[in-house]
């Protein structure tokens, strides 16, 4: 978009045929987003407090994995082009924060498995391998996101001069790796649980 052609009422993107930009009262999922994030954050905080209380006052053991349990809504044509940089800047900051937070959560699970199944060298190697892969990918993705454009401001202000790496590849890489790592973490403890000396029904309950 030519910056010289932008007016206060220019939409950030051309609207679909049959629709008109609505800057005043557009359809929005922002309220639902706020409610959802409030509920999830509240529940997560409560569960973390319960876990820390149990570890400290009942089991009297707090591990490193406990310290790592740390989580718009309108069509783009209903957003003014002059407001787009602020929206993209918020998304950029969210992405930068998301990568280390997800990395820490995944690491917490693997460190928890290693501590629970500490007699097993195989589990130790599997957890260390998972940690290595997750951290290497996350560091690479983190720096790619930060240095996606030159200058960096072009990430959230496409109108300024400069160049960017291929933008579309990052979400696909992140999605594929997160799916694979999630499955790895989910499946990893199952063979070790199944070898425990207990009834099959209890093993199934633990796996569930």
Image (cartoon, grey):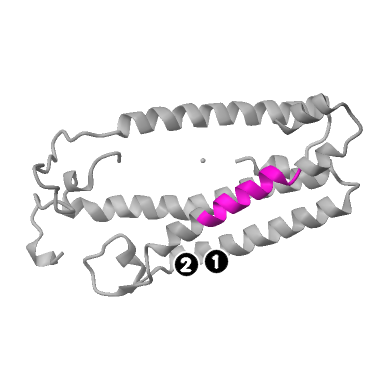
Task: Determine contact: label 2, label 1, CB under 8 Å.
Answer: yes
Q: What is the magenta segment's predominant secondary structure? A: helix
Residue in front for this viewpoint, 195 or 175: 195
Direction from residue 111 to residue 174 in the image, left or right = left
Decide: few, some or many residues near mark 2? Use Cα within 10 Å; few <14, some 14-19, many ≥20: few
Q: Residue at x 82, y 42 (%)?
A: 192
Q: Residue 204, located in which quarter of the rendered image?
A: top right
**Residue 29 coordinates in the image, percent (x, y):** 30, 33
Q: CA distance from mark 2 to mark 1?
A: 6 Å
- Label ID, residue 144: 2
The front one of 68 and 116 is 116
Q: Residue at x 30, y 66 (%)?
A: 154
> Does residue 27 appear to the left or right of 35 in the view shown?
left
Residue that label 1 marks: 140
Q: Is residue 179 magenta?
A: yes
Whole-percent x, y for residue 81 in the image: 17, 54
Point out the residue furthest to the front here: 200
User: Which contiguous range is marked in magenta?
Assistant: 176-189
Which residue does the image show at 43% across and 50% down from the upper left? 94
Percent x, y for residue 70? 60, 41
Residue 97 highlighted magenta (yes or no):
no
């Amino acid at each position: 978009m030519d910056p010289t052609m932008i007016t206060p009422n220019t939409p950030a993107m051309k609207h679909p045929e049959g629709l008109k930009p609505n800057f005043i009262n557009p359809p929005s999922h922002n309220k639902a987003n706020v409610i959802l994030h409030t509920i999830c954050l509240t529940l997560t905080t409560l569960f973390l407090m319960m876990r820390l209380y149990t570890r400290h006052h009942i089991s009297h053991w707090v591990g490193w994995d406990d310290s790592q349990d740390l989580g718009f809504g309108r069509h783009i044509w209903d957003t003014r082009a002059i407001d787009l940089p602020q929206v993209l800047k918020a998304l950029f900051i969210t992405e930068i924060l998301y990568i280390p937070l997800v990395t820490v959560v995944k690491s917490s699970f693997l460190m928890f498995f290693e501590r629970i199944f500490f007699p097993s060298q195989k589990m130790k190697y599997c957890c260390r391998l998972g940690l290595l892969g997750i951290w290497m990918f996350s560091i690479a993705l983190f720096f790619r996101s930060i240095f996606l454009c030159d200058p960096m401001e072009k990430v959230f202000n496409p109108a300024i001069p400069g160049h960017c790496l291929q933008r579309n590849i990052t979400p696909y890489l992140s999605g594929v790796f997160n799916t694979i790592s999630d499955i790895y973490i989910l499946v990893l403890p199952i063979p070790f649980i199944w070898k425990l000396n207990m009834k099959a029904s209890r093993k199934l309950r633990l796996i569930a």
